[in-house]
Amino acid sequence: MTTSILFLLGFALNVGCTDDTVDDTEDTTSEADADTDADSDSDSDSDSDADSDADADADADSDADADTDPQPDNILLNPSFESGWDGSWLIFPADRTNYAVVVNGESMYPEGPGFEAVEGSKAGKLYGVFTGYETETPIYQEFSVVAGDTYTFEGDAFIYSGDPIESAQTYGVLWLKYFNDDYQYFGNSASEALSVDAATDTWTQLSVTGTIPEGATKVQAAIVYWHCTGEAEGDCYDGGSVYFDNMSLHKVEE
């Protein structure tokens, strides 16, 4: 009888110890699982942060590359007339007087609002000669070139509504004119012309691209004001003027 009672007590104690061991094992397993989950979350967050940082860096590098892409070299001197008529722009014939440099705030003819340049504080202005007949007034810069090379000449033009071009016989345009060393003429390339139907009181970008023809050795990048084209009777006195600013001439690289 005594032996049976001791056996039962021992069995009960062993069961109790086993339950405690199971509880301890479960607690340890839970803690391990929690640590593993925490480590996994931390690793995922770190990977995600690293990926995000890498993407952000890549985007920043792309933006920086876009911002630092080299712009074509503008080979014109005094392209926005900031130095006035300093000899960089030539005019033909040389005795022409139908041009000016206007300054920001200067009243536009005949008594308009103050002028505002696109670039800097000045711009060039061309208007008619008023002989009654056809006249061409180019202001230009000349450069030595090689046949087969391609150039783009561009800039901004403005017509004031108080002094508009009055007929299709008169217009402003950009030209690339081609010559050899003896000034034999090899033709030209022309931009869109601003004439009687052109928008007023707004800057319009003009652009012309041309390839130097075989035999030509010079190019003239010319801002041209044609007045009364085709007039044979001598009674054309069209009003109007065109302002030009922010000019650029560059070689087109292949």
Image (spheres, helix red, strand yellow):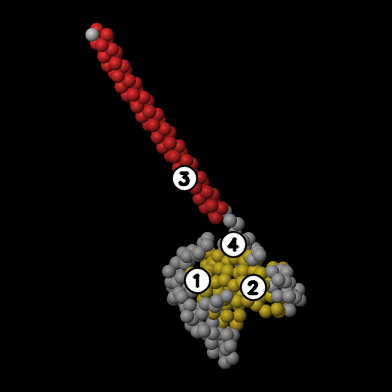
Viewer-nearest of discs 4 and 1: 1
- Which residue corresponds to mark 2? 210
**Could you say where residue 194 lies in the image, as x and y percent from the top left?**
52, 77
Viewer-nearest of discs 1 and 3: 3
Disc 4 and disc 2 in contact, CB within 8 angstroms: no
**Could you say where residue 145 lies in the image, as x and y percent from the top left?**
71, 68
- Which residue corresponds to mark 1? 204
Amino acid under disc 1: Thr
The foreground one among 121 and 190 is 190
Disc 1 and disc 3 in contact, CB within 8 angstroms: no
Residue 237 to residue 84: above or below? below
The alpha-carbon separation of the residues under discs 4 and 2 comes to 28 Å
- Which residue corresponds to mark 3? 52
The alpha-carbon separation of the residues under discs 3 and 2 comes to 47 Å
Disc 4 and disc 3 in contact, CB within 8 angstroms: no
The foreground one among 53 and 73 is 53
Q: Is residue 78 left or right of residue 106?
A: right
Crowd tier of the residue under label 4, counting other residues whose Cα lies within 10 Å: few below 14, some 14–19, many 20 or above: some
The alpha-carbon separation of the residues under discs 1 and 2 comes to 20 Å
Which of the two labelled residues, at mark 4 and mark 1, occupies the earlier sequence position? 4
Q: Is residue 111 visible?
A: yes
Mark 2 lies on a secondary structure that is strand
Viewer-nearest of discs 3 and 2: 3
Viewer-nearest of discs 1 and 2: 2
Amino acid under disc 2: Gly
